[in-house]
Image (spheres, rainbow, N blue to C red):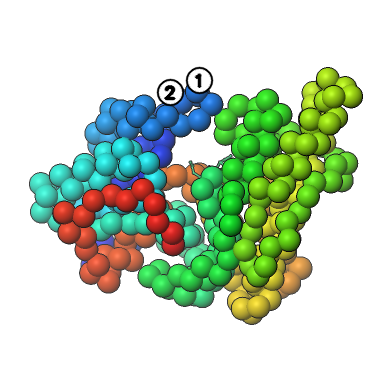
Amino acid sequence: MSVVILGIESSCDDTSAAVIKDCVLMSNVIASQKVHEAYGGVVPELASRAHQQNIVPVVSEAIRQSGLKKEDINAIAFTRGPGLLGSLLVGTSFAKGLALSLDIPLVDVNHLHGHVLSHFIKEDENTEVPEFPYLCLLVSGGNSQIIKVNSPSNMEVLGQTIDDAAGEAFDKCAKVMGLPYPGGPFIDRMAQEGDAKRFKFNKPRVEGLNYSFSGLKTSFLYTLRNEKAKNENFIEENKADLAASLQKTIIDILMDKFGKAIKMTGIKTIAIGGGVSANSGVRNAVQRYADEHGIRAFIPKRSFTTDNAAMIAVAGYFKYLDKEFCDISLPPFARITV
Ligand code: KG4
């Protein structure tokens, strides 16, 4: 018998609901919040208020677009954390209320597991999915981790950042260049026109498979400060080369450790996930690595790299199969790792 899961995601500034039937996507609705643009970052209180306004129409629309009825849903999967507590509370409370009223089980999902398992979202029956174990490079605004995914419920973190995440490196350097928040997508676009070999920035020396991006950020800041002292139009005149050189440095740092992890484990299937996996340079580098080494790479569709409820529904589907349901008394959590 088919299993229908309604997924709900509200960890940051996107309110999303999705319906899947045995991992096949029936609908995925996302309401992004524009209210934060004026503030240069997400304002938690405004985010939770916007979630409150969006949650009912977003969930209704996801069910409507799926062509199914509320009564067809077998369980509700929701993001329990990590994220902004006020935002998480909205999705969590709504999921609990709806599950109670429909008398169906609740499944709590770790948002990071959602990103890692996003490769199991099937657009149709023929979508290919990774085999276990696979190595996932999870790169987002809050995380940079190399994860060995043994099964949907068994993941090992082999390496992670000891300071900033890759997304923070993109965003903080973009801010120094005077770009809006989040700067990652702007750097990506500008980098396409630039010379990536023009500028050199510091690369970290960190043990094992761990990452560090704080040194790069400082090196970028000092380069700009020194050059601006000589020429006040330096950033404007060199923005494409700066973006391309910065992006290349971040990708080199990511690929150096990811490549080491692939060699160490001998795993032949790799994947990427999280907001930074939307970056064209990161996507190309991972695909190129796989082609050169004769291994398989799973690169998510761009719409599944940012926060979305489809990945939460899929992660919830696996827990549903294992009958790992969540008690209605469980609160959301702001911080947790994989
Ligand atoms: O943390 P995340 O997975 O969650 C949200 O959707 O909020 O993704 C956000 C991060 C930000 O740091 C943003 O700059 C980065 O992903 N990002 C990118 C690109 N698209 C998003 N970074 C580089 N290039 C992109 N194209």
The residue that appears at 33% across and 57% down in the rendered structure is 109
Please state the quadrant of the image where ligand 1 appears. Answer: top right
**Residue 131 visible, this angle:** no
Where is mark 2, residue-wise?
A: 35
Q: Please provide percent x and percent y for residue 182.
A: 57, 34
**Residue 211 visible, this angle:** yes
The residue that appears at 40% across and 69% down in the rendered structure is 152
The residue that appears at 59% across and 48% down in the rendered structure is 164
Of residues 144 and 270, the one drawn nearer to the viewer in this rendering:
144
| Residue 17 to residue 129: above or below | above
Amino acid residing under circle 1: Ala
Of residues 166 and 301, the one drawn nearer to the viewer in this rendering:
166
Q: Quadrant of the C terminus?
A: bottom left
- Position of 169 with respect to 305 (left or right) is right
Q: Please provide percent x and percent y for residue 200.
A: 84, 46
Image marks 1 and 2: residues in contact by CB distance under 8 Å: yes
Image quarter of residue 259? bottom right
Query: How many angstroms separate mark 1 from mark 2 (CA)?
Result: 7 Å
Image quarter of residue 244? top right
- Position of 84 with respect to 67 (left or right) is right
Amino acid residing under circle 2: Val
Under tag 1, what secondary structure? helix
Establish whether ligand 1 lies closer than 8 Å to the Cβ of label 1: no
| Residue 202 to residue 289: above or below | above
Where is mark 1, residue-wise?
A: 38
Disc 2: CA contacts within 10 A as few (<14), some (14-19) or many (>=20): some
